[in-house]
Image: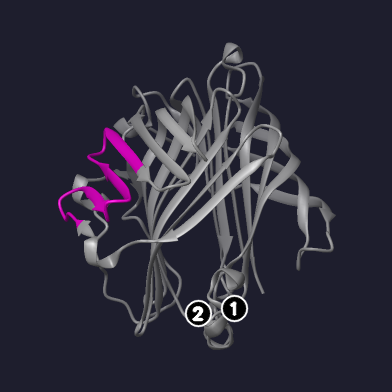
Amino acid sequence: MLFSGYPMLGEGRVVYGNLSPLSAVAPEDFAFTPIKHNHAASNNIYYMAVFDNGWIFIIDLFHYTYGFFEKWGMYVVITDPEGRSFFRKGELNKKALQIREDRLFISDGNITFEGDGSTFRIVCDYSDFSCDITVDNHLSPWKERDGYHFISPDRDVYVQRIVTTPWGKAFGTITVSGKSIPVQGQAYGDRSIQVFPPLKLDPLIVSLRLFSSNLEEGSWQLNLLEHRTHKAFGSMRFPQLWVGKEEEWLYISEDYSITYSDFIQEPEYPYEYPRSINIFSSSGGALVSGTYWVNKMFNFTDVMKEIPEIIRPIASIIFKRPVFFRCLGEFSGQIRLPGEEPKDFKVYGPMEYVIVR
């Protein structure tokens, strides 16, 4: 199946695959505004970048709510090519929060996210970490269909995702423990809302956000995101695979196979994680295949341990135990489009492997 004619996909080229239609979004779709819901909810702004020097930058601002429980927070993870990492988490000052409804703007004075669809800016100012990073979009923001994946029949359980930066250029400065580093590279960002019963979380969420590390071979991106719903909702699979070159998409599909192997169980972690991921997709006469190899795990987060010890017993009744494995690796793959010779490509970046048990 082919589809084309979406301005956000490039200069009118045919994009192969079988993804549902993509829709343009308005600036107010980025706004970090409260939502009404009947379960727990996680409201997130997520950005990541692969810099030209091989460093990785991940930042997430979140608002969790469940009944009377509420938390505004952020975390940032930075790692160098050797896997040496810096992790910072913190709470936002709710009394100082400023939020706009006409575009993305949220700030408590220490952390600010803002953007209008063409440019986004992330500013942090903490004693041990600061940054000022601008992201210029190469491609326009979009959402799949209306942006919603309804999981329960009554539509009370759902995920909404707006891709604010499908592909952009990131540049600016990061300062960690008094040392400033000028950075530039390629970026991805999204705005998401997840509404779910706290004991029926998705048991597995996997993402690959990968970009070329050697720009002399061309600018490539492979972006994969998939999650499976809790068995109470049928263990449904929601997959997305995007492959692009030179800031244009070549292949976008919901139809691919993924195989995890070479699992490793380390004594200090409660669960195992894979060291290799094989991907194969064929649709519309096009084919994508390859393997992602983990070089190093640079961050492990046990969400339960991030909750203050005094309320963990209560939290363990309300929430299951999500853990995050964040790894560095490289994907070696090939894409073959109809009527063209196969193209080999390599992309580099983080895998986030999230388990809830």
Q: Earlier in the sequence, mark 2 or mark 1?
A: 2
CB under 8 Å between discs 2 and 1:
yes
Determine which of the numbered discs, if any, sits on residue 320 in the image.
Answer: 1
Could you tell me what secondary structure mostly forms the magenta stretch?
Answer: strand
Q: Which residues are magenta?
A: 99-123
Residue 210 placement (x, y as % from top left): 58, 35
67 up-or-down from 244: above or below: below
Q: Secondary structure at mark 1?
A: loop
Residue 4 appears in which quarter of the rendering? top left
**Residue at 54% across, 84% down:** 310
Apparent side of residue 166 relative to residue 224 in the rendered image (left or right): left
Name which residue type carries label 1. Lys
Q: Considering the image in quadrants, where does the C terminus appear? A: bottom right
Name which residue type carries label 2. Pro
Residue 250 placement (x, y as % from top left): 50, 28
Q: Which residue is mark 2?
A: 198
